[in-house]
Amino acid sequence: MQTITLSNGVQMPAIGYGVYKISNGEMPRCLREALECGYRLIDTAQWYDNEEGVGKVVAECHVPRSELFITTKLQSGLRVADRIDESLRRLRVDYVDLLLIHWPMGNDAATWHSMESAYGCGKVRAIGLSNFYGDDLEKVLRQAEVMPHVIQQELHPFRQQNELVMRYRQMHIVPQAWSPLACGRQNIFSNPVLTRIGKAHHKTAAQVALRFLVQSGICPIPKSVHKERMTENIDIFDFLLSGEELAAIRALDLGHGLFGWYD
Ligand SMILES: NC(=O)c1ccc[n+]([C@@H]2O[C@H](COP(=O)([O-])OP(=O)(O)OC[C@H]3O[C@@H](n4cnc5c(N)ncnc54)[C@H](OP(=O)(O)O)[C@@H]3O)[C@@H](O)[C@H]2O)c1
């Protein structure tokens, strides 16, 4: 598995498996299959209500903990230290590899300081933000003693956020892409540009979209409950997009998000 080095030296897999909307019941089959396909980064959240399902597989699978990279997310608020401990208990681990604030809620600097404490005592190996823009982002950055290692946000060929991604890169923050396949919107799987480029490399439109992100230094976390799609989505490390192909995909940017709820 190709990795990206975070600013604190932690190695993060270059692609992960997102488990949003996968229930605790479905989790054993889906996550075991994802691990069989080679995924090592698992992206969950307290809000997904499936950390228990992830924890069950983590405890029972044959992949050593040190080879897994587990991300979870919490919301700002009170009792942050307790809520981190609750996640560790549900996930059946001593530490998570990455902890994110899921979205801004106004009292995020205090939450960030509690996350810095958890980072300091080894309960989390890296910390970051998700869906933070404008003032919400600046407030946390201004008060941070530990800068975010990762920022997760909507990123795919139709939503590229190039200026922000460039700024993250200058700050040594790794961008991570949620809904890297646009959750199937805009007919991404039959998009003519992605399909044409894919044909030249014997790849699908989905693989081209994910390769585009990886080649841009962005870590995608696609979700699928189908093993053949899990296999397809991770099989993106044996081809290279040319400058011309990257430019054609860059031109697909719509300049706005497709989901709306976090803008
Ligand atoms: N931080 C945040 O606020 C936030 C927000 C949204 C998502 N996320 C994270 O990002 C992960 C991925 O996002 P997402 O689930 O919204 O969207 P996504 O990964 O862009 O797309 C998932 C959808 O595409 C389908 N799919 C996957 N691979 C495919 C392929 N190769 N060919 C055809 N269809 C394919 C899946 O269907 P099947 O499952 O039926 O295969 C599913 O409907 C989530 O699971 C979650 O971990 C985070």
Image: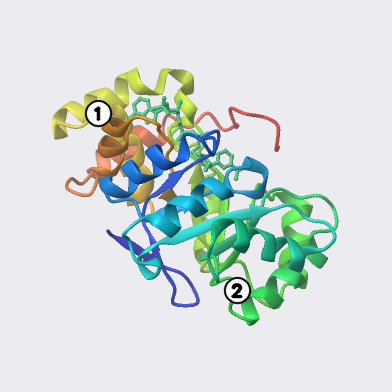
Colour option used? rainbow
Looking at the image, residue 92 lies above or below residue 238 = below
Q: Position of residue 83 (x, y in %)?
A: 73, 60
Q: For the point 63% across and 53% down, which residue is it?
A: 73
Kind of residue at disc 1 = Thr
Residue that mark 1 sits on: 204
In this rendering, position of residue 64 left or right of residue 75: left
Instruction: For ligand 1, tell me if the residue under mark 2 lies within 8 Å.
Output: no
Kind of residue at disc 2 = Lys
Looking at the image, residue 145 lies above or below residue 216 = below
Mark 1 neighbour class, 10 Å CA radius: few under 14, some 14 to 19, many 20 or more: many
Q: Quadrant of the N terminus?
A: bottom left
Q: Position of residue 202 (x, y in %)?
A: 14, 31
Instruction: For ligand 1, tell me if the residue under mark 1 lies within 8 Å.
Output: yes
In this rendering, position of residue 199 left or right of residue 187: left
Under tag 1, what secondary structure?
loop
Under tag 2, what secondary structure?
loop
State the mark number for residue 123.
2
The picture quadrant where one finds residue 30 is: top left
Q: For the point 57% across and 49% down, which residue is it?
A: 52
Q: Position of residue 193 (x, y in %)?
A: 31, 24
Of 87 and 134, which appears nearest the observer?
Answer: 87
